[in-house]
Image: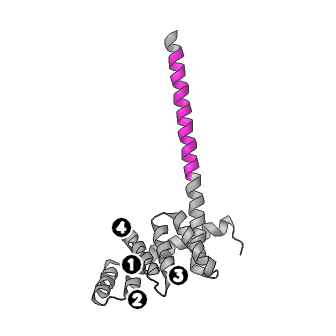
Amino acid sequence: MVHTKKSQKYARTALDEKLALSTPSRETLESLAVECAANPSPDNTFAYAFCLGKSSDKSELRYAITILDSLVKEGYEHQIDCMFGAATALYLLADFKDARKRCEAILRSEPDSSGTVELHLACVEAVEVQERVDNLAMGGATAVAAVGLALGIAGMILKKR
């Protein structure tokens, strides 16, 4: 399937809106944590970590990634879902490159996963925007350095006169 810059931008906008609307409430997270502690099982752990992976708190997002990655390492049966949850948390942490890598790993085994395709396109768009901003910042810093150098030289020349 061919995707354009426009479809990448659209995917990112749509995903950002969905994620903003799916931030779990404190009550939901607390009830899942209590359930996970009261009845420890991989399924309860997954439900808690997957929900935590959409939190607005950065430390909770990092914790969700840790839990989801450990479920994958332990051979949990829903590994693709764990990888998607971790990729979503990485996206929310603005670690777009790592999120993109995880999406690509998922898409190698499940190329028709529409949620993963959308997240992947959003990551591609976010990385490109991030690179443009970095390039602009580098260009701006170079320009400021050049102006400073020119003013320094001009000051030295005027001082000699």
Give the residue number, with chain letter if any, for mark 2.
Answer: 43
- Earlier along the polypeptide chain: callout 1 or callout 4? 1
For marks 2 and 4, give the CA distance. Answer: 22 Å
In this rendering, the label closer to the viewer, 4 or 3: 3
Residue 136 vs 45, above or below: the answer is: above
Callout 4 amino acid: Ser
Q: Could you tell me residue 12's position as x and y percent?
A: 57, 69
Give the residue number, with chain letter if any, for mark 3.
Answer: 80
The answer to whether residue 55 is left or right of residue 103 is left
Q: Element type at marker 1?
A: loop
Residue 53 vs 144, above or below: the answer is: below
Q: Could you tell me residue 70's position as x and y percent?
A: 42, 77
Which one is nearer the viewer's eye here, 44 or 4?
Answer: 44
What stretch of residues is rendered in magenta?
Answer: 133-157
Q: Element type at marker 3?
A: helix
Q: Could you tell me residue 15's position as x and y percent?
A: 54, 73
Q: What residue is rendered at 51% in x and 70% in y?
A: 16
For marks 4 and 3, give the CA distance. Answer: 23 Å
Q: What residue is rendered at 69% in x and 70% in y?
A: 3
- Earlier along the polypeptide chain: callout 2 or callout 4? 2
In this rendering, the label closer to the viewer, 3 or 1: 3
Give the residue number, with chain letter if any, for mark 4.
Answer: 59
- Earlier along the polypeptide chain: callout 2 or callout 3? 2
Secondary structure mostly seen in magenta is helix
Quarter of the figure with the N terminus: bottom right
Residue 24 circle label:
1
